[in-house]
């Protein structure tokens, strides 16, 4: 079955509308009190690979609900006025999520091109996962 619009086109369209930081540019923002990194990966990815130091975990499936003040799941962090820098494993999900949040009116919002993989490659600080017990 062929899709009318595939994920590659969706991501390309999102990338044309949003701000993308390279991992190096994002590293320069780490520690800025006006910037909040948002990790949208699945919790299993965090447990397996670790996370960006200081990042807030907001699972992709709940993101729109956590951002909208009208939602019963609203998280006040998203009303802080900070710049939000989203990332996933490789930059695809975060591009789509950034586009969606931008459409909802969240400002400023951007994402890390290449995601957590690019961050790790660039030597960005990572909180390593806890060793498995047992």
Image (tube, rainbow, N blue to C red):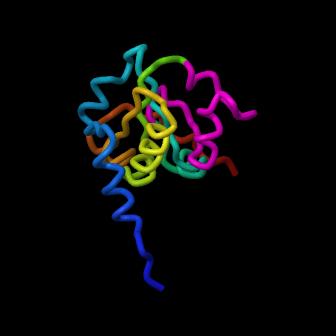
Percent position of residue 113, x then y: 31, 45
Question: Which residue range is magenta in the image?
Answer: 52-79
Q: Nearer the viewer, residue 35 or 50?
A: 35
Q: Is residue 123 above or below residue 79?
A: below
Percent position of residue 83, x then y: 41, 24
Q: Is residue 128 left or right of residue 15?
A: right
Percent position of residue 114, x then y: 32, 49
Residue at horizontal 56 percent and vertical 47 percent from the top: 60
Q: How many marks?
A: 0
Q: Is residue 127 left or right of residue 18?
A: right
Residue at horizontal 37 percent and vertical 46 percent from the top: 115
Residue at horizontal 54 percent and vertical 45 percent from the top: 46
Q: Examine the image and state in which quarter residue 122 appears.
A: top left
Q: Is residue 17 above or below residue 35?
A: below
Q: Examine the image and state in which quarter residue 35 appears.
A: top left
Q: Examine the image and state in which quarter residue 20 appears.
A: top left
Q: Nearer the viewer, residue 122 or 97?
A: 97
| Residue furthest to the bottom | 1
Q: Nearer the viewer, residue 119 or 104?
A: 104
């Amino acid at each position: 079955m062929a899709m009318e619009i595939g994920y590659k086109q969706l991501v390309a369209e999102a990338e044309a509308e949003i701000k993308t930081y390279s991992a190096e540019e994002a590293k320069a923002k780490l520690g800025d009190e006006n910037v909040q990194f948002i990790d949208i990966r699945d919790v299993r990815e965090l447990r397996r690979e670790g996370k960006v130091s200081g990042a807030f975990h907001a699972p992709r499936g709940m993101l729109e609900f956590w951002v909208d003040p009208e939602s019963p799941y609203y998280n006040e962090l998203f009303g802080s006025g900070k710049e939000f820098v989203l990332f996933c494993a490789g930059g695809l999900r975060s591009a789509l999520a950034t586009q969606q949040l931008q459409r909802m009116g969240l400002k400023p919002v951007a994402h890390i091109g290449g995601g957590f993989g690019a961050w790790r490659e660039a030597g960005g600080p990572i909180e390593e996962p806890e060793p498995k017990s047992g």
